[in-house]
Image (spheres, rainbow, N blue to C red):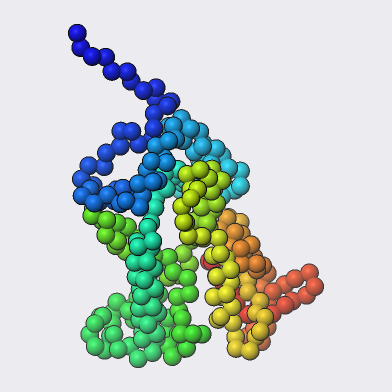
Amino acid sequence: MGTVTALKNPATTAPLDHYNPGSFYCELLGKPDNRNRHLTALWHRMQQLEVANLASRSKDSERELFTLGITFTVYSDRNAIDRILPFDVLPRVLTAADWRRIESGVKQRVKALNLFLWDVYHHQHIIKDGTLPAELVIGNENFRPEMMGYDPPAGTYIHIAGTDIIRDGVGDFYVLEDNGRTPSGVSYVVENRHLMQRAFPDLMQGFAIESVSEYGQQLAAKLSEVAPAGVLDPQTVLLSPGVFNSAYFEHVFLAREIGVPLVEGRDLVVENDRVFMKTVSGVKPVHVIYRRL
C-alpha cells in the first residue's frame, strides 16, 4: 500500500513554497550559485505570510491607491483611462552594495551628459574630433541654435534625470535609456514606499531601509540653486499642462512636496522679459519654473 501525502490547503500555503528560479538570476535571492545572504531574513519572513493573506492585503492596497487618486492616464484605452499605479506586494530589494554602485554610476552618467551638452553648445570638440557625426547632433530636431554660447546656472542643462536600469541574466546592471527632459514617476516611488509601510509593516520591520520621503525637500533646494543671482528667497512654480495630462497626479504631488504653487500657462504673464504669476493680490515675480510640459 502506498503512502498518502496530505496536500496543504491553498489558503494556508506560504507564498514561496513552490518557487524555484532555477538557473536564472533572482531579484529576491540573487545568483543561482551565490544566493544573497542579506535577503535570507526577508525570504523567511515572507514565508510566514499565507497566500490568502497576501492576496487580501494586495487588494486592500490597490483599493487605497484608487481612493487616493494615485493614478496615471492611458489615452489609448477608453475603457480604463485612469489606471492605478502597479503595486507589487513582493518587494524588489537593492542591497547597500547594489545601491552604492548604482548611485556612483548614475552620478557619473548625468555629469557626462551635462558636459556633453556644454560642449555641443560651446566648442563642439566632440564633433570636431570625429567622436560623433555632426548630423547626429546639429541635424537633430531637438538641437537649439539659439542656445549656442549660453552659460546655464552651475553649468547644468539636465537638472532632473530619469535613468532606466535593468539587470541581465547574471544580475549585472545595464542602462536602457536616459530621460533628461521631464521624466515622470518619482511620485509613484514615494507613494509606493508609503503604501508598503502601511500595508506590510511586519514585512519591513527591523530592516535598515533608506528613506525616500525627503525627495521634495531635496528637489526644492536644487531648484532654488538655479534662481537668478542675488535673489535670496526665490519663488519657484511648477508649470503643468493641466488636469488632463497623464502625469497630473505627479504634478500635484510634487508641488505639494516642494511647497510651491502649481500653475498653468494662463496663470503666468511676461512683462519686460520677466515672468510673473497671477495671484488674488496681484502679480508676483517668478524666479524658477519647473516645467512639466
Q: Is residue 256 visible?
A: yes
Residue 240 shows up from this direction:
no
Seen as rendered, the residue at the extreme right is: 281
Q: Nearer the viewer, residue 199 or 150?
A: 199
Q: Position of residue 258 (x, y in %)?
A: 61, 67
Q: Residue at x 54, y 75 (%)?
A: 222
Question: Quick check: 156 above or below 73?
Answer: below
Image quadrant assignment for residue 115 = bottom left
- Image quarter where the N terminus lies is top left
Q: Return the residue nearer the eye: 240 or 202.
A: 202
- Which residue is depicted at the point 27% across and 56% down? 171
Q: Position of residue 59 (x, y in %)?
A: 51, 36
Counting from the top left corner in percent of width and height, residue 36 is at 30, 51
Q: Is residue 10 left or right of residue 4?
A: right
- Name the quadrant containing residue 136: bottom left
Residue at point 38%, 41% (across, down): 44
* Residue for point 63% across, 71% down: 237
Say which of 32 and 288 sits in front. 32
Image side of residue 98 versus residue 129, left or right: right
220 above or below 191? Answer: below
Give the percent coordinates (x, y) of residue 46.
41, 40
Q: Quadrant of residue 112?
A: bottom left
| Depth check, front residue: 243 or 70 | 70
Eyeballing the image, is 229 above or below 1?
A: below
Classify 195 as above or below 102. above
Q: How many numbered discs?
A: 0
